[in-house]
Image (cartoon, rainbow, N blue to C red):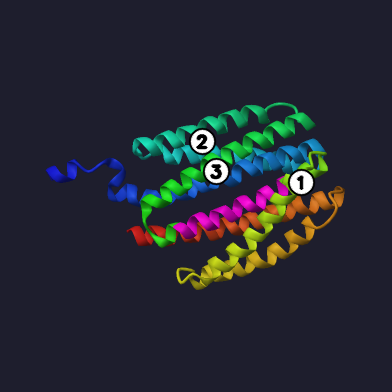
Amino acid sequence: MAAALLVPSWQTAYAQLALSTAINRTARFRSLSQRMAKAYCQIHLNVLPEQARTVLAASRRLVYFGFADLAKVEWPGDLSSQLEEIHKLALDLDALLMQPPSKEAVAAVSLQADKMLASADSTTQAFEKISKTSTARLVTTAGRQRMLSQRLAKNYSLVAAGLNSQTLANQMISDAIEFKQALVILGASPVSSPSIRNELALVESQWVFFDAALQRQPDARGLQAVATTSERLLEVMDKVTSLYDVALKDELG
C-alpha cells in the first residue's frame, strides 16, 4: 500500500487509460485549429455562412470540453506546461475569432491557428512517447488525417480570399500526398479491425470527392463543394480515430 501511494497520480491505471483520451484530445486540437480558421474564412467569403457559423460554434465547444477532459488528470510538469501553452494559444485564437471577418482578420486567424496546431502537434507526440505502444502511433496518425482535411480546406479558402502564395500551394500538395500515404499505413496495420477497415474504405471514397473538389477553381461552387466534402471527410475520419482510441484503451487495460 505504501508503494502504491508513491506512484504519481498520472501513472495510475485510470491515468493510463486516460492517456489514450489525452492523445486523442491533443490530436483533435490540431484539426480544430484549422477547422475554426476554415469556418471563419467561409464566413468572410459568404460561403454557406450559416453552416460555417454552426461549425465554428461546435469547434469552439469541442476545444473547451477537450481541455476540461485533460484537466481531470494531474499530468507531470512538462506535459502540464505544454497543455497550458496550447490553452493560451487557443484563447488567443478564440479572441481573434470574435472580430468581424475581413481579409486581414482571416490572415491573422490562420496564423494563430497554425501556432495552435504546432503546439498541439508537439504535445500529441509527447503523449505518444509516454504510452510506448504501437497503437498510440495509429491514434496520432488517424488524428492527423482530421487536421490535414481541415488544413486543405482552409488553405483552399485562403486562396479564394486573395491570400495565395507559393508556400500555401506547396503545403496543399504536401498535405494531399501525406493524407493518401497515411491511409495506406492505417490500412496495412494489423491493429486495424474489420470495422476499422470498413470505415477506412469509406474514408477513401470520401477522399475521392474531396480531392475532386480541391481541383476546382476556388469559385462559389468550388468553395461550397470543399466546405461540404471536408466536413464529411472529417466526420468519417473522426470515427476512425475513435476506433483506434478504443483499441489503445484495450491495449493499455
> Looking at the image, which residue is at 43% across and 46% down?
126
Under circle 3, the secondary element is helix
Residue to which mark 1 is pinned: 166
Question: Which quadrant holds residue 58?
Answer: top right
Q: Secondary structure at mark 2?
A: helix
| Position of residue 4 in the picture relative to residue 248 (left or right) | left
Q: Residue 191, percent across and down?
A: 45, 68
Please tell me which residue lies in front, 102 or 119.
119
In the rendered image, the vertical position of residue 215 relative to residue 188, given as above or below: above
Q: Which residue is mark 2?
A: 86
Mark 2 vs 3: CB contact within 8 A: yes
Position in image of residue 71 (x %, y %): 41, 37
- Name which residue type carries label 3: Phe
In this rendering, would 30 be left or right of 42? Answer: left
Front: mark 3 or 1: 1
Vertical side of 218 occupied by 86: above or below:
above
223 sits to left or right of 87: right
Bounds of the magenta segment: 137-154
Q: Residues within 10 Å of mark 2 (few under 14, many from 20)?
A: many
Amino acid type, label 1: Gln
Q: Is residue 197 left or right of residue 231?
A: left
- For label 3, the residue is 29
Please name whichever residue, 48 or 140, is drawn nearer the observer in this view of the structure.
140
Q: Residue at 62% across / 55% down in the picture? A: 235
Q: Let me know if residue 58 is in the magenta part.
A: no
- Residue 202: x and y, percent? 64, 67
